Image: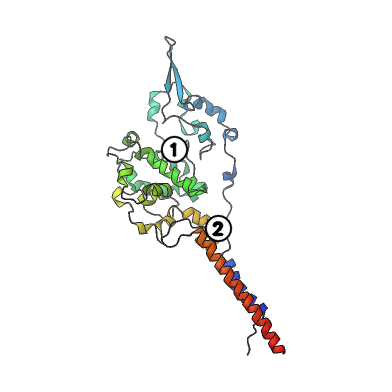
């Protein structure tokens, strides 16, 4: 049996692998995000914004005034950074739609505040978000379990809470919503530096002498680039495949220090920093494109040079074109010779 080799069959042979790649690369269809996330944030959309101004007329200003009721003397004092709330930042945070008294005791409505309110036990994440199907996808219960095992908790006698990292008045979920990896890294590392870069704040939760960040990481090649491109938690936490962000902070001596741990085909960054981006790009661009085109992790011997990319595509295109031209003329002259 003689195999037909007409141009139509040749094109079909070329299309089969392309069709296979296309089918393999179809985006993964998932359910739409929570409709609540589509609500536009801002003070104008918060029904409690006027009520909140009762608090923000002091806590929303960087300075406040005290009046002596006997002498009438007025003094101006700076608002402590711990008690200052930036209105614009708050109304763009995850808790933007709340009233202040949703989380704080109603007695805060009286001024000056009673001393006893200073001992008000703050809520933690599970008080509102725990064991509720509405928030099940965030896995707050698993996060709490990890936190209780972490060095943050065990080495501070339980003084370290969610709010030491996640300020309830300003926190934004960048790891899940952010499109810019460098923005995610910058904001995440800034959370760490609030304590680890400030001996005073560090001393509020621990009696351990804080280490100097720069000198402690002198072993790290291209230190500035690493601080810009990698989160502290990528090296200082234990990877948890079921959580988007691991909260099991390990002691300093257990931190990752091997280059190959990150700069290899099975980089730990794909299970930490790039976990969400990899999942989203796979949904949007398909498996092949997400693995080849959208992978921003630095892997030794595998990262791309744009010049090499374009050069390779040009060579591939010219080679394919030459093969097609050669095939075309060979078939044409073969038919001509056959007819003669």
- Which residue in the structure is indicated by mark 2? 283
Please indicate whether residue 105 sits to the left or right of residue 213 in the image.
right
Q: Position of residue 69 (x, y in %)?
A: 43, 12
Residue 12 vertical position relative to residue 58 in the rendered view, above or below: below
Q: Position of residue 329 (x, y in %)?
A: 66, 79
Visible in this render: residue 132? no
- Which residue in the structure is indicated by mark 1? 167
Kindly identify the residue that appears in the image at 49 percent across and 58 percent down: 295
Q: Which quarter of the figure has residue 262? A: bottom left
Q: Residues within 10 Å of mark 1 (few under 14, many from 20)?
A: some
Q: In front here: 13 or 307?
A: 307
Q: In front here: 293 or 31?
A: 293
Instruction: Name the mark on residue 15.
Output: none
Q: What is the count of numbered marks?
A: 2
Mark 2: secondary structure: helix
Q: Residues within 10 Å of mark 2 (few under 14, many from 20)?
A: some
Q: In front here: 79 or 159?
A: 79
Going by the picture, which residue comes out furthest to the right?
339
Kindly identify the residue that appears in the image at 41 percent across and 41 percent down: 191
Residue 332 vertical position relative to residue 296 in the rendered view, above or below: below
Q: Position of residue 194 (x, y in %)?
A: 39, 38
- Between the C-alphas of marks 1 and 2, the distance is 31 Å
Display colour scheme: rainbow
Mark 1: secondary structure: loop
- The N terminus appears in which quarter of the rendering? bottom right
Q: In front here: 242 or 171?
A: 171
Please indicate whether residue 182 sits to the left or right of residue 17 in the image.
left
Q: Position of residue 271 (x, y in %)?
A: 43, 56
Going by the picture, which residue comes out furthest to the top?
71
- The C terminus appears in which quarter of the rendering? bottom right
């Amino acid at each position: 049996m003689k195999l037909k080799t007409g141009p139509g069959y040749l094109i079909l042979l070329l299309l089969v692998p392309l069709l296979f790649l296309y089918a393999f690369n179809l985006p993964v269809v998932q359910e739409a995000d929570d409709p609540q996330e589509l609500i536009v944030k801002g003070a104008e959309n918060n029904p409690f914004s006027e009520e909140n101004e009762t608090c923000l007329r002091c806590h929303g200003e960087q300075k406040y005034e005290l009046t002596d009721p006997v002498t009438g003397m007025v003094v101006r004092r700076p608002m402590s950074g711990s008690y200052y709330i930036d209105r614009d930042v708050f109304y763009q945070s995850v808790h933007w739609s709340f009233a202040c008294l949703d989380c704080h005791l109603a007695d805060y409505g009286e001024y000056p505040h009673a001393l006893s309110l200073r001992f008000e036990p703050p809520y933690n994440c599970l008080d509102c978000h725990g064991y509720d199907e509405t928030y099940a996808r965030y896995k707050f219960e698993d996060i709490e379990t990890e936190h209780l095992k972490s060095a943050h908790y065990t080495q501070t006698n339980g003084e370290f809470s969610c709010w030491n990292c996640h300020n309830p008045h300003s926190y934004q979920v960048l790891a899940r919503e952010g499109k810019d990896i460098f923005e995610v890294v910058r904001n995440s590392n800034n959370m760490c530096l609030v304590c680890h870069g400030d001996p005073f704040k560090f001393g509020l939760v621990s009696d351990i002498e804080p280490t100097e960040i720069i000198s402690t990481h002198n072993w790290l090649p291209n230190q500035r680039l690493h601080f810009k491109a990698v989160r502290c938690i990528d090296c200082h936490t234990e990877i948890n495949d079921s959580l988007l962000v691991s909260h099991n902070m390990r002691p300093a001596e257990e931190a990752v220090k091997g280059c190959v741990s990150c700069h290899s085909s099975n980089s730990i960054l794909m299970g930490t920093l790039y976990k969400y981006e990899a999942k989203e790009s796979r949904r949007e661009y398909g498996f092949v494109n997400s693995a080849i085109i959208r992978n921003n992790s630095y892997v030794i011997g595998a990262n791309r040079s744009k010049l090499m990319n374009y050069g390779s595509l040009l060579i591939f295109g010219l080679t394919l074109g030459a093969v097609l031209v050669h095939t075309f003329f060979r078939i044409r002259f073969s038919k001509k010779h056959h007819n003669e």
